[in-house]
């Protein structure tokens, strides 16, 4: 059930991005893109409604899928539907055999950050271009603005002035906080592992007893029991 | 004892927010709101004094409740009393059964961040609107400013110029650092769990001995002791 | 040996701060403050040289005390000598009995952050006030600038333009990164503890074997050995 | 095989930095520096191609060395080749005996951050100086801009306007996120160790059973088995 949605998201991304990147697109193409994005929107709404209908524990589903609900209900958050592609990243990631868990997390975070920055740049440019007092006018500027926002640097040379642009910025800020958290958490997890591995190598005798140790002990006790059993049988 | 305070905080929030959000409010309503916020203030002071009076270990209470003292003493920090509502969030959270500890922390952090941003926007707007050289003039702008501050992006398109506004900003910055820390800590805790679960699955024999292992060993030794006891009784 | 240095740091702080906070100070007082800060500087240099001379492992001492060396050698970093007061904070902290380790870390981080912000504001104001193109002109502005720098918000309404001011800003940025790291680390440590405590409570049987378990097992084996010993003595 | 590359990187750094730091360099020297940087570039390309050719698991090598590929292919990222010097730092670090693992990580992070800031300042200055609308015109300004970017403060007094300058800024932002993550992770790892050491000291009996405990138990069981063996031999 995931692949049709992923294809829909790719179609949505293309039909959404093309008129934004090509401001001089003829009217016909522009209308076609609008129809495609509207169709993709309908697919997402139907998917959400069906999943609510078939879910076992409906209150829990609603509670844990608030972002999907917001995307379906709020028109300003329409571009977020492109984040559906994160599922595709997740699946590519899972099928990439031979990597450590931490390596897969790093690959996922890097590709998700790239997708979020490009999506945010598209949505921000769409919202800001032509607005009175706006300063984000080209796709290059929009990518640069998205980068300074995700990294929480925020020079202030470019910033959104419309409500939609500021909503996009808020999503980028949240993504930036999550990105920073994920990088830090990966480094912390790696460092804690390394340091405890160092400690382990240092003092072997003070290490926690392992199942191997217990099994060796069990073997010893079993041999003892066998000897006692033999002692008794000789007597009888 | 918590619920009356929570109701007081909700009343305070409404009476505080209304005149700020409706600059054209008639004088009568404005006075009524002022009376209500003053009454709520008295309730908070009385609550603080009573809690100091009945606390077992007074020096420890004073030491661990410095924020409450500051809120009671400094007029500029009055809006912080709305953070009393964080207790309400905490209680709703505890009663939400069936969630993991980490899930409850995430829900609490998300709702606390939303409350802090909205409260900060209200207090910042109240402090800044009409001040000479100020650039935060509408509630929308104030929310946007609070968002850029909490996320530590700080574009600089909007910033406070009054002392009160800067105090509000300082609280928002602290909240931002705490938010970033909480997100990172949650991700780190999740990742460390996942990685150690992976390691556990990989090598079962090198795992720490569990109580189960020890109990199986104890059973073996007890059986052995019973055999020896029988051996002795046969002899007697 | 720490207390004389702490007193010197307090005197240095007072003699350094007074002329900065009171631009209209008479010339006599200004000269007296200059003499006091110079004297305190000599004390710090002598202390550093003596500690190098008496240290057991001199290369290691030099390697781990690079900040002290920079403070002694670079005139622009003179205000950093106030950070000597962090030692005082550390001692007050250690003597505060009855707190958990994590509580003491939190108290130390909070007071160190306050000291760094105030020191940075003083040093930044001293460097910037009167410089061509500078925008930090009052102590209030300087504190606000130090806050926006430490929190890494960086609105850009105020920023240093002199080399000394930018060095002070670099120290504040480093302090901000350390502050963010300390807050995050404390939250992560607390959360990891809580989650593992939850896990422990959930499944007791899968817990690691404790020394208590082993001692109960040892008692059982000892009793068995006593019985066998009795068996043998009966026979002899 | 690492040392020739390191020497090449040092030569590249010198030949790259000199014309940037000395805008008035005579044409002859300028050409010589250009030849040297081009030669160093060829060395890096050859090194990359050879390493791809001799690698055991070529797809894995390509996947884990994406940054090297980007540096070889994209001219705008040429200055990143200076980060080859990070390998030198890593080797110096490994040979620094007598330090803890965490100490070595801290030393590596500090020196890597310094190298990244200086390299970023050079590359940013090279890209921005003379561009229309650019505000980074001297090396001092460039270092200051790199600092505000790496620390994610981003005042916005200086910011890049060219595509190359923005690419350099993006690398600095990534380095800043990694720096913040590394500092936080080190503090978290230290704090988690300290807190668990505190816990260990507090309750010794509830500690995990160590290999020592198991060995003492094994000795006891072996002695018992010897006694039973003697019992049997007496009988025979």
Image (cartoon, coloured by chain):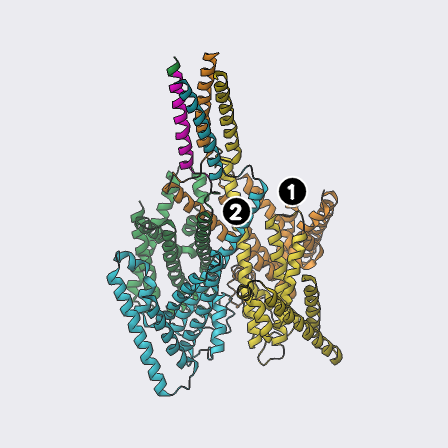
Chain colours: A green, B orange, C yellow, D cyan
The mark closer to the camera, 1 or 2, is 2
Q: Secondary structure at mark 1?
A: helix
As drawn, D100 above or below B131: above
Instruction: Identify the residue position indicated by label 2 in the image.
Output: C191
Write the residue at 69% across / 62% down: C3
Give the chain letter at badge 2: C
Residue A73 lies within the magenta run: no
Disc 2 residue crowd, few under 14, some 14–19, many 20+, Cα 10 Å:
many
Q: From the top left corner, tell me how far across and down residue C206 is, in percent.
A: 46, 35
Q: Is residue A138 visible?
A: no
Spatial separation of the CA atoms under disc 1 and disc 2? 25 Å
Q: Secondary structure at mark 2?
A: helix
Quadrant (top left, top right, bottom left, bottom right) of the N terminus of chain B: top right
Q: From the top left corner, tell me how far across and down residue B116 is, in percent.
A: 57, 54
Side of C166 where B36 appears, left or right: right
**Magenta stretch?**
A208-232
Residue A214 lies within the magenta run: yes
């Amino acid at each position: 059930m995931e692949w049709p949605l992923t294809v829909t998201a790719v179609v949505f991304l293309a039909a959404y991005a093309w008129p934004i990147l090509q401001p001089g697109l003829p009217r016909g193409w522009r209308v076609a893109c609008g129809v495609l994005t509207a169709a993709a929107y309908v697919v997402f709404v139907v998917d959400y409604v069906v999943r609510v209908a078939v879910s076992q524990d409906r209150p829990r589903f609603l509670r844990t899928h608030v972002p999907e609900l917001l995307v379906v209900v709020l028109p300003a958050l329409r571009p977020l539907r492109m984040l559906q592609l994160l599922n595709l990243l997740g699946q590519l990631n899972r099928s990439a055999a031979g990597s450590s868990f931490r390596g897969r997390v790093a690959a996922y975070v890097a590709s998700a950050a790239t997708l979020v920055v490009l999506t945010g740049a598209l949505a921000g440019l769409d919202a800001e271009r032509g607005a009175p007092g706006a300063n984000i006018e080209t796709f290059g500027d929009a990518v640069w603005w998205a980068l300074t926002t995700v990294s929480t640097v925020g020079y202030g040379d470019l910033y959104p002035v419309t409500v939609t642009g500021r909503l996009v910025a808020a999503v980028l800020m949240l993504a930036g906080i999550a990105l920073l958290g994920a990088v830090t958490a990966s480094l912390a997890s790696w460092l804690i592992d390394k340091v405890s591995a160092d400690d382990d190598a240092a003092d072997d005798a003070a290490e926690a007893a392992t199942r191997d140790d217990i099994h060796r002990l069990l073997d010893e006790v079993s041999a003892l029991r066998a000897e006692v059993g033999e002692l008794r049988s000789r007597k009888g």
